[in-house]
Image (cartoon, grey):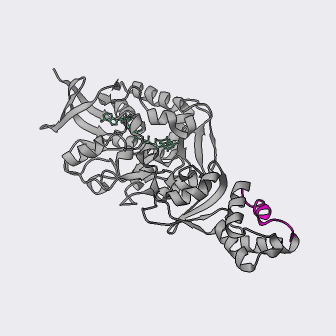
Amino acid sequence: MEAKYDVVVAGAGAAGMMCAAQAGQRGRRVLVIDHAKAPGEKIRISGGGRCNFTNIHTAPANFLSDNPRFCISALRRYTPRDFIALVDRYGIAHHEKTLGQLFCDGSARQIIDLLLAEMSKGGVELRLQTAITEFARTGTGFALQTTGGPVACDSLVIATGGKSIPKMGATGFGYEVARQFGLRVTETRPALVPLTFDVSLLERTAPLSGVAVDPAQVSVGRTRFSEALLFTHRGLSGPAILQASSYWREGQEIEVALAPGLDVYAELRAARTRRPKAAPATVLSDLLPKRLAQLIAETHAPTGNMADQSDKVLRALAEAVNAWRVKPVGSEGYRTAEVTLGGVDTRDLESRTLAARDVPGLYFIGEVVDVTGWLGGYNFQWAWASGWSAGQSV
Ligand code: FDA
């Protein structure tokens, strides 16, 4: 006998649990299916275990999509204020870390518990370690084959996320469902991901592994981010680089300012007069971490003290500090990417409800959709907003 539900949500992640709770509280009979052992695994590891659950400055400009206007409706319907009010109702203490990013004071687990409590308020059933093996449209809804038996539903919500961190159960399942039902899927690629260098560049930068610069300004084309940057044994990471990675494409250079806002050439000229006997590395280490200052000085002013350096050399030093143009060779890929850029094409979805335009009863929410937020709580806000919006409609 197949079990019959009003709504089946595939994926017990951030978006799926929010949607299921809303639909359940509206009186719908809801089943959530996930192949993982536990719900909300990405929430659990997010924000270094404290979950950066929203950003108070959330605006459409913080999202990438082929249609930058698509996210507006859901983000307006369910705002960071709404989620903060929910968090407050559960007495979860939180703080703003930086740039509008809100984190739990305690643990990300509190957000998962909140979502589970909201689901149980709506009588939602959760089946873990269950895979959907087949899915088809029937006259009035959908018929699913799962490893826990057949299931029928009127509305099917795909909330299976993107491809990042396959080790945690990420799959391309959502894109497969979209394609099977005739929806388009835009090109997908790893985003919010460290960038890597080729061997010859790595030879020079490897000794810097572990060195952080905060803030650095990283530009890709006309897009800029001023946040921390970290040298790694593979290339560059840190929030400024993760942000830039969403805009970067193979073959493109990024420009890095390691002492943003400072006229480094003027500083160096002044230092040549004031401290003629100082080594260039010593002067640079007033502006930069010591190891980085040493490497830049060795490369561009290998001999002599400040008094011996020509204007040309000082310019080269200044450029290495604040206009370092570097061409990454790639990224660390889905293994470490926080999100997947691209996804289910928004042209085939209703922006208010996240429903498929041409397949009644089918919905796509969260990261599987071609809406990708910046680093800083924006991706969870999209998961809450899109999940909530679909939850009002299923
Ligand atoms: P999500 O990936 O959360 O959930 C999808 C669910 O579907 C999973 O439970 C998965 O097991 C299940 N699933 C997948 N395929 C399936 C299948 N075939 N059958 C059944 N179930 C299936 N964002 C943010 O705003 N603030 C932050 O602090 C962080 N931090 C962070 C850290 C790290 C390490 C990562 C990897 C990511 C973040 N993010 C983040 C991004 C954020 O985690 C992400 O955008 C959301 O979790 C997306 O929510 P979804 O519900 O769409 O997918």
Give the image location of residue 49, x and y in percent.
56, 34
Q: Is residue 337 magenta?
A: no
Majority SS type along the magenta span: loop
Residue at position x 40%, y 24% in the image: 120
The front one of 217 and 74 is 217
Q: Is residue 220 left or right of residue 143?
A: right
Q: Is residue 89 left or right of residue 302?
A: left
Ligand 1: image quarter: top left
Q: Is residue 277 magenta?
A: yes
Q: Residue 281's quadrant in the figure?
A: bottom right
**Part of the protein shown in magenta:** 275-289
The front one of 39 and 291 is 291
Q: Quadrant of the C terminus?
A: top left
For the image, the number of numbered tags is 0
Q: Residue 294's quadrant in the figure?
A: bottom right
Asked if residue 57 can be seen in this view, the reply is no
